[in-house]
Amino acid sequence: MENYIVFGILSIPVILVSRRTLFDFRSHGFYRLFSWECIIWLLVSNYTFWFVNPFGIRQVISWIFLVISLYLLIAGVWLLRKTGKPKDTRNEKSLFRFEKTSELVDRGIFSYIRHPLYSSLLFLTWGIFLKNTSVVVFIVALLSSIFLYITALFDEKECIAFFGPKYAEYKKRSKMFIPFII
């Protein structure tokens, strides 16, 4: 019962942050909300297992995924803020300020992957999953991954609409989530 309460409490700020896209099925933020909700469920389900058997192979891989997740988050946000030239003149209400870039960011981590922030969430999802695996937790992690993939697809449509052929060319020379792989 306490897991449901904690899940509900943690969901409130996520829903408030996502309120602008809550009913906009054409926005990447709509699908991102569901991924965030899955990640919250994973956290609530697995938080008691974070330091159990700290040197077990699953735990070690989990921590590697979590560190990669943190790196991708920091590198992605830093580059968006530094080189993306966020502008309030971009009128898309569904975007956070740092997402309102007026310049295509295609250097640093972005030269390898188009979505380091979503990639960060993928690594977070599977890092949390590995803390304590079960069928239900696997299904939730898989759902989170599917929602992140859909989020990236909708985000790319929005980027093509804003940046045009420049973004289409960028897609050809970069991967979606993991350098050199996918």
Image: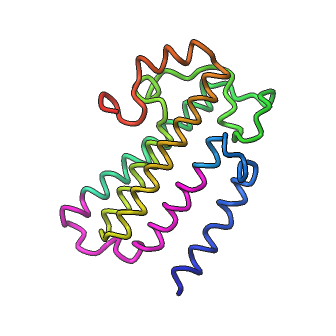
Indicate left or right for 77 with 46 as reference.
Answer: right
Indicate left or right for 119 with 22 as reference.
Answer: left
Residue under the point 36% across and 56% down: 126
Vertical order, 88 against 42 (above or below): above
Image quadrant containing the C terminus = top left
Please name whichever residue, 88 or 137, is drawn nearer the observer in this view of the structure. 137
Residue under the point 43% across and 50% down: 145
Please name whichever residue, 27 or 77, is drawn nearer the observer in this view of the structure. 27
Residue under the point 50% across and 61% down: 38
Q: Position of residue 71 (x, y in %)?
A: 42, 43
Please name whichever residue, 67 or 171, is drawn nearer the observer in this view of the structure. 171
Vertical order, 67 against 95 (above or below): below
Among all residues in the image, which is located at the extreme front?
25
Vertical order, 154 against 4 (above or below): above
Residues rendered magenta in the picture: 32-60
Indicate left or right for 34 with 172 as reference.
Answer: right
Q: Main secondary structure of the magenta part?
A: helix
Quadrant of res 124? bottom left
